[in-house]
Amino acid sequence: MSEKAKLIFLVEDNEMFSQTVKIGVAKRTGFEVVTFGTGEKMFEYLEEEKSVPDIIVLDYILNSVDASAKNGGEILELLRTKYKGNVANAPVIMLSASTDVKDAVDLLKKGAKDYILKDAAFLDNLVKSLENIIELKALRAEMSLYKNEAQSLKKRLWLTVAVVVVFVIVVGSYFVWFKG
């Protein structure tokens, strides 16, 4: 893991479940987990704190405490449309007790990176998904560095070729004019 702990936002309306996940994820990964009871509370935090999560873990059904709260799918859409930059691009993992494949497919089409069932293997699956997404982000950043380096080397190569061509032309002209 890098020098800075990864920041995970967990949006879950069941406080006991939320704290269990927070402790389990933090203990197994070392990631910092900030919890929210609704997506709206997460949005308030984003507006006030300006801290950007590395990953957002979002429950699908979020109205057990606040009946007017938006569901996870609606929050996911708002993330992608309301925000720009790092927040809009933050990977989202959806959680649900629903085994309805249609829900999972719809959420993945909306941009969720994973859909995890709240079952007996839930915490193992969540930790693995978090680690995979962090690793993928690191690999993409590394690939971007290599791509930039390759572009720089390509420019240097073309400059070297141009210098060699000019040199050949100058030397050739010298021999034609003065030796020929």
Image (cartoon, grey):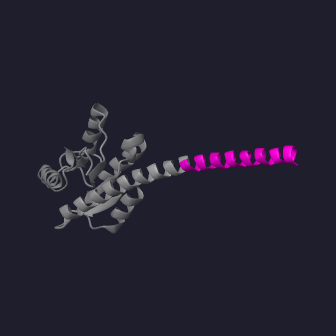
- The answer to which of 97 and 179 lies nearer the viewer is 179
Q: Is residue 4 left or right of residue 164?
A: left
Residue 130 position in % (x across, y down): 27, 56
Residue 143 image offset from top left, x and y in percent: 44, 54
In the image, residue 148 lies in the stretch drawn in magenta? no
Q: Is residue 160 left or right of residue 81?
A: right
Image coords of residue 108 (percent x, y): 38, 60
Q: Is residue 160 left or right of residue 19?
A: right
Is 162 one of the magenta-colored residues? yes
Most extreme residue toward the top is 48
Residue drawn at point x = 30 percent, y = 61 percent: 115
What residue lies at 25% left-to-right and 39% top-to-bottom? 41
**Most foreground residue, 105 or 170:** 170
Can you see residue 112?
Answer: no
Please tell me whether residue 178 is drawn above or below residue 119 in the rendered image: above
Query: Front-most of 135 and 113?
Result: 135
Would residue 126 be found to the left or right of residue 151 on screen?
left
Quarter of image, res 125: bottom left
* Residue in the image at 63% along x and 47% along y: 160
Note whether 113 is above or below 55 in the view shown: below
Whole-percent x, y for residue 23 in the image: 13, 52
- What secondary structure predominates along the stretch shown in magenta? helix
Relative depth, front residue between 34 and 3: 3
The answer to whether any part of residue 70 appears in the image is yes
Q: Which residues are magenta?
A: 153-180
